[in-house]
Amino acid sequence: MPEFLKSIPVSFSPLAKEHIHRIRQAKGISPEYGLRVGVKGGGGCGSSGISFLLGFDKPGESDDHFFLDDLLVLVDKKHTMYLLGLEVDYITQDGVTGFAFVHPDQKQPVL
């Protein structure tokens, strides 16, 4: 049984939570899947070298487990330091709508 930690390293705006629950319901995603939040290496020229990930997945051995309302959130232990303090938001910017990771000090989305 995984250890459940007290605080999730990333927060979610009310609009992001609403869209996550809508997607889960519309796609009929099984409760055994959690919402994976993480990073992926290999950014392009001039970037920080990472991309942020958000999607439904089964829990893995190296995951920390959190709850967002009634939704299981999965974060690979190695990704925690990259997510600390970020907020997942659902935005419309320059005609593009979707999830974005927002740096709290800059309030600029990372698309």
Image: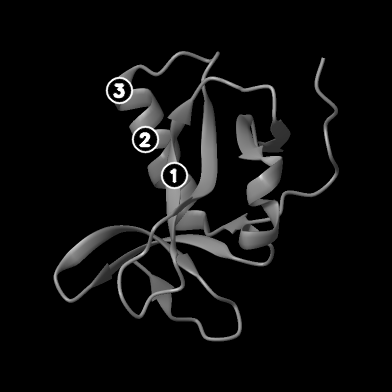
Furthest-bottom residue in view? Answer: 106
Which is nearer the N-term, disc 3 or disc 2?
2
Position of residue 58 relative to residue 88, above or below, is above
Dot 2: few (<14), some (14–19), or many (≥20) neighbours within 10 Å?
A: few
Which residue corresponds to the image point at 69% horizontal and 30% vertical from the top-left? 62
The quarter holding residue 105 reads bottom right
**Residue situated in front as seen by the camera: 43 or 91:** 43
Q: Nearer the viewer, residue 39 or 69?
A: 39
Q: Residue furthest left?
A: 95
Label 1 vs label 3, nearer the camera? 1
Residue 62, numbered label: none
Q: Residue at x 63, y 50 (%)?
A: 79
* Residue named by callout 2: 22
Identify the residue shown where x is 46% and y is 13%.
30
Residue 26 at what x, y percent from top left?
A: 29, 25
* Up/down of 73 relative to 6, above or below: above
Q: CA distance from mark 1 to mark 3?
A: 15 Å
Nearer the observer, disc 3 or disc 2?
3
Among the 4 quarters of the image, the one containing residue 34 = top right
Q: Pointer 3: residues within 10 angstroms few (<14), some, or many (20+)?
A: few
Residue at the spot of label 3: 27
Q: Which mark is residue 54?
A: 1
Measured as percent of width and height from the top left, residue 58 is found at 53, 20
Three-letter amino acid code at disc 2? Answer: Arg
